[in-house]
Image (spheres, helix red, strand yellow):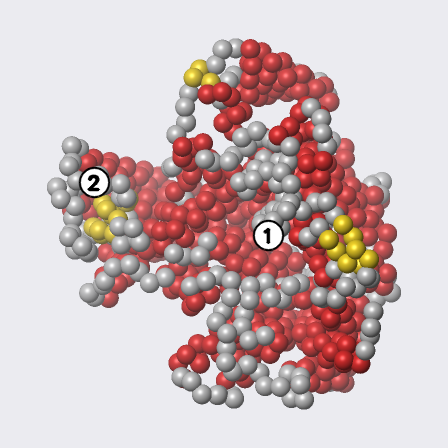
Amino acid sequence: MRADSRRLGLLVLLGGGLTLLLWYLAPWAVPHRLFGGEGVLLNPFGHHLPTGGLPHGYRDAWLFPCFSLALAWLLLSLGLPWRAGPRGLYLAGALGLGLFLLTYLLFQRSVAEVNWGAERPLLRRYSLGLGSYATLGYSLYLLLLARVYSPGGLAFLVRRREVVVPLFSLLLASLLGGAMVAVLKESPGTAGSLREALMLKLDLVTYAYQLLYSPLVNPSGFLQSLLLATPLIFTGLSVALGFRGGLFNIGAPGQLILGAIAAMLVGVYLPGPRALVLPLAVLAAALAGGLWGALVGWLKARFGAHEVINTIMFNYIAASLFLFLISANEYKFLGHTLYLPFKYPGYEARSYEVRPEARIPLWTDLLAPGGELSFALPLALLLGLLGYLLVRRSLGHRVLAAFLLGTAGYAVGGLLPGIPVSFGPDLTSVRLNGAFLLAVLALFFFHLYVFRTVGGYELRAMGLAPKAAEYGGVPPGKKAVLILFLSGALAGLAATHYVLGGGIDEYRLKQSLPYSVGFDGIAVALMGQNTPLGVGLAAWLFGILLTGGLQVNLQLGISRELVAVLQALVVLFIAAGGFLPRYFTDPLRAAEVELREEAARG
Amino acid sequence: MNLDAAFLTALLLSTLRQTTPLLLTALGGMFSERSGVTNIALEGILLFGALTAAVVVERLEAALGPGPHPWLPWVGVLAAMGVGGLVAFVHALVSIRYRADQIISATALNLLALGAPSLVLTYFYGNATSSKEVANRLPLLLGLSPLVYLAFLLVPVAWWVLFKTPFGLRLRAVGEHPEAADTLGVNVHRMRYVGVVLSGVLAGLAGAYLSIGFLNQFVRGMSAGMGFIALAAMIFGNWHPLGILLSTLLFGFASALAIQLQGTEILPAVLVQAFPYVVTVLVLAGFIGRSRPPGAVGKPYEK
């Protein structure tokens, strides 16, 4: 217990010292920022004010009192842990949160004051700086310490290791990414001293991350993040399903390509009514992706060929096939000429446009067809969910009830009179489409199949203990083929977003099809720990980062690939268990920790 | 089809050129797998090596000014080997020390190799897809890069190291039965680190060959799956230097054929490009049953 409290004191001291350092070095607030990232930096220890200084009429009188309060709070928190234990830490953490809120409100008010009735252009690009965020971070850190050092705290963390490890890995990756930005990008603005240079660097990194997460607070960015998350949900589920069954599917890119080809073939060449063609096109994408995956499964079952290298080879083969279909219409084979009908005339490698009947509608047409907010979709979703939750019989009955009630809801909702709405051009330009709903359905499917059916039970058994599953009566070969079929089908469905949903601005197969999102699925699956909720959230997170990455590129000139690097680092760190102690990765040791803490509590 | 002498000579030379990076990488992969660690990060390490060689040589050229510097490409080669070893060390650290799944750890490095070069290229050259061309590429010896000769020379060397030295014996023991090796006083973890880093050094060398031997710049995605094909060749070659020589020659021939057939009316190039990948699939399906991987490959070792 003695050693424990000393360690706690040391940890608090460490956090406090870091906070103090950041307060001294980093700006507290940036009331104004120029294009290119140069900002007016406010810091209680002296401002760095380029090009004209503070915006006219801006008052920073709040800064110094805030700082004095924060300093008093910091000293208090440094003295507390030895005496008051976790309770004191909770108090200090709560106080810190309040302090951050106060700083935020005062800053917003002073910005609003300048903008109030101003004749010059309004202040738009303003934000708090790293100094203020350090207050927030330290408060959260104190709260975390309080939880960990109260009785049973470690067991609490260890039980939630599925959340702790990915989040910690994300934090580590972000730190490393920040360091990379600091090295690779010169800070905008001129520094007079070393301290100013450090301030500019810290501000640059903060700004980069603010841009990266900006889709969270900006409506069109928000929709765009959902758009980019859509294919990631599918490919993430595809990889996660493989993982659950003990198979590593690196073949999502190839399966996506096959799905895209099939969707294009049905969408372009099959005439018919919408009710027939659209479902068929979607099914074709799933089927083609699934068969491409199942082929690898068959090679594994029949010949023992390892799926990892084979899925990778199948990616390259699929890419060649894809180019073969849409890059030319005339090929020479041993002197004979072969004619293909698929390529659209012109220089660019692309197919013909998908017929209107086979297109997945955009979100505006789903939510508000003809400019009127329709109740069809919300009602269908609501009733569907109710149907699933209220019927208390077998899974089949519940799904059937959900489907029937959902359909009824859609029909009734369609008859109700709509409310007229209009969206701004920044919102209507986002090509979020019905494939997003398909992705959400896929999340449900994954949950139901993997966790609620016999087949899913067998699949998980195969992943956890293949030998035991085999003795338990699971045919490993057949199951591997099935797993890779379903996995490939999910990856193939990702193509519906691009080809049928117009996700890349046109309703056709194009050479620019970003099939490498299949690889991103690996990061999504690991980040989401192979659970449907986790995959959904991880895909959304990466959707946000990808959207924000565009802003980073636009405003700071840092390559968008920063996001790809962050993803790769997250995967690496999660693989290493976030470099956390062993009991976070090893279930047996985790159980040991829980038992020990249980015993200690008596 | 007119298969004249010129076509055949070109095909032969091209085969040697295409085999070189595969051979270097596959021999590296062999050392890693013989020590018990799968290294599918070789694809990424190839890219890192290629990037390092091109950027180091180009930057040094910019610093040193014009004029031929015959030693300069060799600095690039050494740098690429160093960086390759470093990236492999990360893989070793994560998968040996932290007992991570070796395939996931390596996949992370491959993903990193898809993104990181763009950041570096943007920093130095303002575009995300290729480096500036270097003036001092590796010299040619009788029409071939010296690294070609080196690669083929490494086959007997690797054989000798693996089967005739105490080091080779320990490496194989650690990959076959780590518990037994440990009982005999062999440091399992250290041997594995050496095996993995060695694979990275060789893959980095292969990368340097791609960017400043085969071409004279780094182009995004220039490894085009060679790292994976090298792994397939290693499996096909039964984790044995001579087997690897033969199998990489087969794959090198397939790639060379694809290149030589381009622009002819024999087969469409886009399909022929898929040829090595199809061969890999066929090889894995047809022959893996006969090959036997090192006993402990892919499993973290814990005392």
Q: Nearer the viewer, mark 2 or mark 1?
A: 1
Disc 2/disc 1 C-alpha distance (Å): 45 Å
Question: Along the line of sight, which residue is nearer the eye, A223 or B239?
Answer: A223
Q: Secondary structure at mark 2?
A: loop
Q: Secondary structure at mark 1?
A: loop
Pointer 1: residues within 10 angstroms few (<14), some, or many (20+)? few
Query: In the displayed structure, would residue A536 be above or below residue A28?
Result: above
Q: Amino acid at mark 1?
A: Tyr
- A88 horizontally vs A523: left or right: left
Residue A458, image x, y percentages:
77, 39
Query: Residue, x 73% and y 32% (percent of image)?
Result: A270
Query: In the displayed structure, would residue A374 be above or below residue B281?
Result: above
Question: Along the line of sight, which residue is nearer the eye, B213 or A231?
Answer: B213
Label located before the other in sequence (2 or 1): 2
* 2 and 1 marks in contact (CB < 8 Å): no
Please name the residue that numbered disc 1 is placed on: A347
Query: Residue, x 38% and y 56% (percent of image)?
Result: A557
Please name the residue that numbered disc 2 is placed on: A121
Query: In the displayed structure, would residue A89 be above or below residue B229?
Result: above
Query: Residue, x 16% and y 36% (percent of image)?
Result: A118
Query: Residue, x 71% and y 26% (percent of image)?
Result: A272
